[in-house]
Image (cartoon, helix red, strand yellow):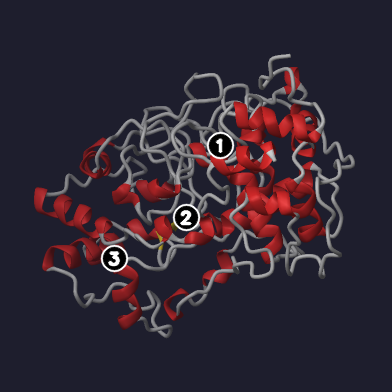
């Protein structure tokens, strides 16, 4: 019988693995697209916990859940992981991030561990979470593109385009109140993480195709998940809650602290000041960059544009917000990603309508439209939209400042890289 991704999706473990190899493999994210861009989410179907088939090789007794992962010979041939020396995904924050913990949206009582975050890393890159086995979360949240997508819209499992631009993920941990998606429709990062799996355009496990229960069944056919779930949770049961927790823990580890702004801000940081010193002239900045910093940080009474009231340093994650007046009459209250690495993007706003930072700044200078959902911080004393009509010099200065927020470290951090070995290695192991 000819093997394909449809006929063997819910077959026994080895057949499922052979299918994934034939279809391009279970892992990897580059090229195609898939996860947390926007678009309508189908109804969830529940957790669907069930036993996982035994791995091809016997497993040694695991250490305490969360501290390590005992990998079978097969799992070790598929995954680029050192199960006994797992990386730490808890943020290591520099001194100038003092106080940012108050913005942390991690749910109270969450148990964190390297093994849970590592499980999340594998799930993030695994194309088995899509119904066709062709896209993963990493397909449209690409590490090389700062966990965003360089295109305006991402391509789903069947080639259709998503309904919104895939936002960058850095510093999502510090967005309050923690609601997710551009329109804030998801109550938490955990709840958001499996909605793309159920989306009929993105990853395809909508209600008509079995929902999360069918996705769980697909994962149960992959023996390496037995190792990963045992290491993370102490037993091999796979369910939606565990998938959500692992993905959220991995994504919350994506904290940006290595931009030029961070290096300079650390030198002037003063926790005794109301603005923590972030509106001081920054060492190593050009006059233009420091002018942009002043426009961004200072309130309007002090000659600035009060950008920092919404995009709060040091994380530059958005505080609770309305919309930013892209369209007249807009009723929705929208969010944005952190501005870290914004200058490395190629599409901006929830619908990717702008392709340059210059266009973004021009919108805030002359284009803000009124509507019921417009954020109050974009209104003047008369209640009308603010349109400051900035000079060209000031617009250029703001763009220059935003470029200092670029962090090249996150895009190269091996903790967040594809954990799957090349597919040739998987095929060779299966043939033995």
The answer to whether mark 3 and mark 2 are in CB contact below 8 A is: no
**Where is 64 relative to 389, above or below?**
below
| Viewer-closest of 223 and 182 | 223
Estimate the x, y position of residue 142 in percent, counting from the top left.
Answer: 45, 44
Estimate the x, y position of residue 321 in percent, counting from the top left.
Answer: 49, 48
Estimate the x, y position of residue 59 in percent, counting from the top left.
Answer: 83, 57
**Where is 333 relative to 287, above or below?**
above
| Label 2 – label 1 distance at C-alpha | 15 Å
Give the mark, 3 or 2, whose residue is nearer the N terminus: 2
Residue at x 50% of width, y 74% of height: 93
Residue 428 appears in the figure: yes
Give the mark, 1 or 3, whose residue is nearer the N terminus: 1
Task: Tell me, for residue 418, which label it has, or none.
Answer: none
Label count reads 3
Q: Quadrant of residue 94?
A: bottom left
Callout 3 environment at 10 Å: few (<14), some (14 to 19), or many (20+)? some
The answer to whether mark 2 and mark 1 are in CB contact below 8 A is: no
Task: Tell me, for residue 35, which label it has, or none.
Answer: 1
Task: Tell me, for residue 170, which label it has, or none.
Answer: 2
Task: Tell me, for residue 298, which label it has, or none.
Answer: 3
Callout 2 environment at 10 Å: few (<14), some (14 to 19), or many (20+)? many
| Label 3 – label 2 distance at C-alpha | 24 Å
Residue at x 21% of width, y 63% of height: 303
| Quadrant of image for the N terminus | top right
Q: Of tags 1 and 3, which is closer to the observer?
A: 1
Image side of residue 197 versus residue 264, left or right = right
Image side of residue 226 versus residue 126, left or right = right
**Where is 308 relative to 148, above or below?**
below
Residue 177 appears in the figure: no
Callout 1 environment at 10 Å: few (<14), some (14 to 19), or many (20+)? many
């Amino acid at each position: 019988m000819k093997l394909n991704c449809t006929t063997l999706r819910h077959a026994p473990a080895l057949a499922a693995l052979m299918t994934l190899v034939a279809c391009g493999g279970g892992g990897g994210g580059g090229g195609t697209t898939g996860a947390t861009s926007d678009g309508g989410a189908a109804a969830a179907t529940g957790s669907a916990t069930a036993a996982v088939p035994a791995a091809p090789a016997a497993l040694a007794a695991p250490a305490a859940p969360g501290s390590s992962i005992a990998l079978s010979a097969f799992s070790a041939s598929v995954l680029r992981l050192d199960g006994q020396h797992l990386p730490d995904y808890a943020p290591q924050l520099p001194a100038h991030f003092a106080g940012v913990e108050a913005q942390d949206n991690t749910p109270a009582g969450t148990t964190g561990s390297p093994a849970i975050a590592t499980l999340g890393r594998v799930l993030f890159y695994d194309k088995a979470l899509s119904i066709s086995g062709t896209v993963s979360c990493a397909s449209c949240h690409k590490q090389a593109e700062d966990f965003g997508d360089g295109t305006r819209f991402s391509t789903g499992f069947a080639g259709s385009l998503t309904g919104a631009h895939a936002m960058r993920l850095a510093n999502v941990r510090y967005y309050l109140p923690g609601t997710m998606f551009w329109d804030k429709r998801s109550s938490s990062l955990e709840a958001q993480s499996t909605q793309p799996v159920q989306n009929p355009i993105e990853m395809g496990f909508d209600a008509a195709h079995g929902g999360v229960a069918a996705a769980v069944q697909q994962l149960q056919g992959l023996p390496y998940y037995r190792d990963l779930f045992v290491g993370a949770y102490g037993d091999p049961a796979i369910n939606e809650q565990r998938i959500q927790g692992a993905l959220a823990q991995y994504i919350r580890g994506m904290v940006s602290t290595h931009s030029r702004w961070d290096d300079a801000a650390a030198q002037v940081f003063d926790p005794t000041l109301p603005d923590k010193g972030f509106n001081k002239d920054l060492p190593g900045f050009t006059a233009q960059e420091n002018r942009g910093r002043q426009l961004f940080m200072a309130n309007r009474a002090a000659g600035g544009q009060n950008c920092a009231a919404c995009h709060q340093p040091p994380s530059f994650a958005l505080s609770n917000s309305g919309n930013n007046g892209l369209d007249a009459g807009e009723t929705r209250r929208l969010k944005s990603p952190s501005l870290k690495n914004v200058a490395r993007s190629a599409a901006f706003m929830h619908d990717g309508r702008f392709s340059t930072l210059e266009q973004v700044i021009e919108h805030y200078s002359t284009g803000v439209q009124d509507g019921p959902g417009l954020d109050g911080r974009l209104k003047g004393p008369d209640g009308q939209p603010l349109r400051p009509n900035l000079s060209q010099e000031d617009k250029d200065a703001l763009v220059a400042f935003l470029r200092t927020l670029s962090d090249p470290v996150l895009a190269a951090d091996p903790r967040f890289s594809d954990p799957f070995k090349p597919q040739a290695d998987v095929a060779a192991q299966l043939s033995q």
